Structure formats: structure tokens, C-alpha cells
Image (cartoon, grey):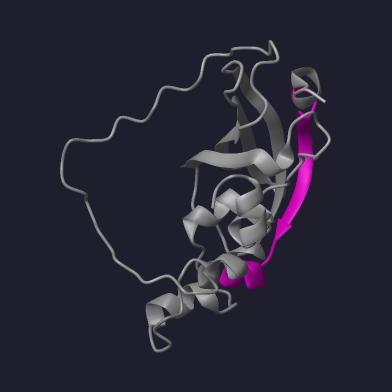
């Protein structure tokens, strides 16, 4: 079945409810490397559920509803997450009740033996008062689905990397089981945790 751009565009949804709780915020922090120093009061502020618990801003990337299905005309096992965009409109709390608006923003067919590129956009707001919380953009490579005379929507301009030293650098050793831990946040792509799936997709 070829890539079906009309079906992908029909995935647009409004007012999708989504709940996020303090325990999930703590788990996200643990899964991205917090907690190595058990006596670090600063890290515990992100890990322990409390009225003052803090939220790691990047967890917005998993605070959404995945509306994709494997039968939307693409080879799902050949999909790669290529880029991520996040704009925070206000600080996040460790526990949130959200409403999300989701759409496939652009589809770009790069041609035969090349990928199709999907750009999605999710706008999330607090359910309690409708205040905007964050905007999330994601670029997906459908590696096996180009060349079906699909649309060639213009792609976002690449981010220009500043020609200067970084504002901050931090070096941290990843845990051997970190991919398995992160998976519990809702990222169920088998390529991250199964060598046989990675080999079948030509990535190992």
C-alpha cells in the first residue's frame, strides 16, 4: 500500500484530552539521567512527587497523544524520528490536565528510492483555563515511502547553528538500560531497544 497523504492529513484532531501526573514527571526525569547522585537535593526536586516538584521542560516531547496508526499507507517499521521542535509558552508543572490540537502540517515526497517527510504540529493548553502551554513540532522520515507522486510541501528552514562556543556543556554517562527506561514514557519504537528490529530496518 503506498503512502496515503490524504489519510495522513485527515488525522487532524482538536481538543484531545491528555493527563500527566507527578509520578510520570519523576519517571521522565529518571529516564533521562536524573538521580545518579542520590544525595543531590536539586535532582530530587524533579524526582519526588510533592507540591513543589519541578518538571523537566523537554518532557513536553512525550506529553501528547500519538494518533498515528500503522496502516496509514506507510511502512511503519521504516519510520525514523528526524527532528524535534519545542516552544514553551509558560513553565510546566509536574502534573497537568491538557487539551491538544494535532495536525500533519506538511508532507514532502522526495521521490523514488528516497523518503517521504512528514512534519507534525501539536499545540497543547491547560484544560483548566485554556492557557497555551507548549507547541511541539516533529519531523518524521518515512524512509521507504517516497516516489508515490505525493505532495511536495515546502519544508521548514533548518535551524542556523550559531558560530560561537556553546553557552553550557555537560557530560554524562548514559545508563545501560536507559533506552528501556525511556520507552515507558510512551516511545514504543522497537528500533530503540531490539537489535533484530534495527537490523531488519537496515540500521545495524
Picture quadrant where residue 149 is located? top right
Name the residue nearer the viewer: 97 or 184: 184
- Could you tell me which quadrant the N terminus lies in? top right
> What's the residue at 58%, 78% (across, down)?
50
Instruction: Give the residue furthest to the bottom.
Output: 39
Name the residue nearer the viewer: 35 or 115: 115
Name the residue nearer the viewer: 63 or 177: 177
Name the residue nearer the viewer: 82 or 44: 82
Q: Is residue 70 above or below residue 20?
A: above
> What's the residue at 60%, 77% (across, down)?
49
Q: Would residue 32 be visible to someone looking at this image?
A: yes
* Magenta stretch contains residue 101: no
Taking 16 as reference, is 96 left or right?
left
- Where residue 42 appears, as percent x and y from the top left, is 39, 77
Q: Is residue 148 above or below residue 68?
A: above
* Magenta stretch contains residue 19: yes
- Where residue 19 appears, as percent x and y from the top left, is 73, 57
> What's the residue at 84%, 35% (across, down)?
71
> What's the residue at 72%, 40% (across, down)?
76
Q: Which residues are the magenta region?
A: 9-27
Q: Would residue 130 be visible to someone looking at this image?
A: no
Q: Is residue 65 above or below residue 158?
A: below
Taking 17 as reference, is 79 left or right?
left
Instruction: Give the residue furthest to the left.
Output: 164
- Where residue 37 appears, as percent x and y from the top left, is 39, 84
Amino acid at each position: 500500500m503506498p503512502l496515503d497523504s490524504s489519510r495522513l492529513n485527515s488525522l487532524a484532531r482538536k481538543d484531545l484530552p491528555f493527563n500527566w501526573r507527578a509520578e510520570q514527571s519523576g519517571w521522565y526525569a529518571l529516564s533521562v539521567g536524573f538521580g545518579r547522585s542520590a544525595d543531590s537535593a536539586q535532582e530530587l526536586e524533579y524526582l519526588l512527587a510533592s507540591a513543589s516538584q519541578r518538571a523537566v521542560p523537554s518532557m513536553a516531547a512525550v506529553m501528547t497523544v500519538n494518533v498515528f496508526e500503522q496502516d496509514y499507507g506507510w511502512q511503519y517499521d521504516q519510520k525514523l524520528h528526524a527532528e524535534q521542535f519545542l516552544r514553551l509558552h509558560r513553565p510546566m508543572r509536574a502534573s497537568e490536565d491538557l487539551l491538544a490540537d494535532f495536525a500533519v502540517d506538511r508532507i514532502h515526497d522526495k521521490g523514488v528510492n528516497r523518503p517521504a517527510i512528514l512534519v507534525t504540529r501539536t499545540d497543547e493548553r491547560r484544560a483548566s483555563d485554556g492557557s497555551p502551554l507548549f507547541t511541539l513540532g516533529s519531523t518524521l522520515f518515512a524512509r521507504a515511502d517516497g516516489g508515490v507522486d505525493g505532495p511536495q510541501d515546502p519544508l521548514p528552514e533548518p535551524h542556523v547553528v550559531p558560530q560561537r562556543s556553546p553557552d553550557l556543556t555537560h557530560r554524562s554517562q548514559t545508563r545501560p538500560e536507559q533506552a528501556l527506561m525511556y520507552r515507558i514514557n510512551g516511545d514504543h519504537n522497537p528500533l530503540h531497544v531490539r537489535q533484530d528490529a534495527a537490523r531488519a530496518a537496515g540500521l545495524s
